[in-house]
Image (cartoon, grey):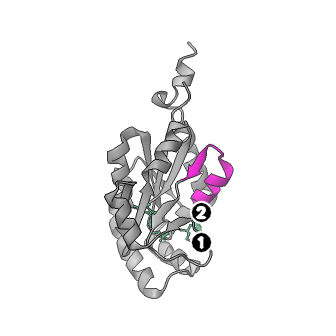
Amino acid sequence: MPRRGLVLVVSAPSGAGKTTLCKRLLQEDPEIAFSVSYTTRPPRPNERHGHDYFFVDRETFERMIAEDDFLEWAEVYGNLYGTSKSQVLKRLEEGRDVLLDIDVQGAFQVRQKLGREAVLVFILPPSLEELERRLRSRETEDEETIRRRLSVARKEIERAKDFDYLVLNDDLEEAYQTLRAILRAERQRPFRRPDLLERF
Ligand code: ADP
Ligand code: 5GP
């Protein structure tokens, strides 16, 4: 029997460094793959269809909801975002891990659907001031969007206590090593390692 795959759910207020941390994890760990979400948000200049997201119109997204294609979906900052159920389940059945970069509402939906198959990690910025600085430094959003994201951030952080793990992203290297350690340890839980136990 192979080891069982896990779903690593990473959530954070926008600008906390989630994309930076997740990209590195995906580059360095061949056992985990990114679940490419569907969204109705227009692509940013550096984003590729099928790589960062599947960019679809609202009609397509709503049809997918009706057909029960999503493991979870949510409205975030006025756009719809959803995780493909088939993409995730296929990967798990192969005994490999899946990384979901999704918002807090989506994280709790995944916990409800998948129970202990999912590991919920919340990335915290050092402070709200630093979060604002990082959002501005990225230069991808306008002023109104930045303000909206900061006010949502406060509410998201209130829900962080219900996650399995917190990772403080102050020093980037340290935060990355903590994220790696969580994944490494979670892979060793007995229910995920029938392959180890069946040797005896
Ligand atoms: P998110 O995906 O959470 O919205 P990003 O990964 O895009 O956030 O990071 C937001 C900005 O903050 C980026 O410009 C990124 O380079 C920067 N950043 C990420 N982590 C750190 C850190 N530990 N220290 C300083 N800047 C950081
Ligand atoms: P962005 O538009 O900056 O790429 O993402 C905005 C927010 O939507 C981020 O918090 C991101 O994690 C979240 N998000 C991306 N994909 C999904 C998804 O499939 N489901 C949910 N619930 N949130 C998502």
Q: Is residue 187 above or below residue 127?
A: above
Residue 136 place in picture, x, y as percent: 53, 81
Q: Name the residue under label 2.
A: 51
For label 2, the SS is loop
Residue 19 place in picture, x, y as percent: 56, 63
The structure residue drawn at horizontal position 48% and vertical position 72%, both measured from the top left corner, is 131
* Quarter occupied by the C terminus: top right
Amino acid type assigned to the residue bearing label 2 in the image: His
Residue 104 visible in the picture? yes
The structure residue drawn at horizontal position 45% and vertical position 28%, both measured from the top left corner, is 191
The structure residue drawn at horizontal position 44% and vertical position 45%, both measured from the top left corner, is 119
Residue 157 visible in the picture? no
Residue 73 lies in quadrant: bottom left
Q: Which mark is residue 47?
A: 1
Is 26 contained in the magenta span?
Answer: yes
Q: In this view, does 33 lie to the left or right of 8?
A: right
Magenta stretch: give its range. 21-34
Amino acid type assigned to the residue bearing label 1 in the image: Glu
Residue 110 place in picture, x, y as percent: 37, 50
Residue 68 lies in quadrant: bottom left
How many discs appear?
Answer: 2
Is 153 contained in the magenta span?
Answer: no
Between marks 1 and 2, how big is the CA–CA gap? 8 Å
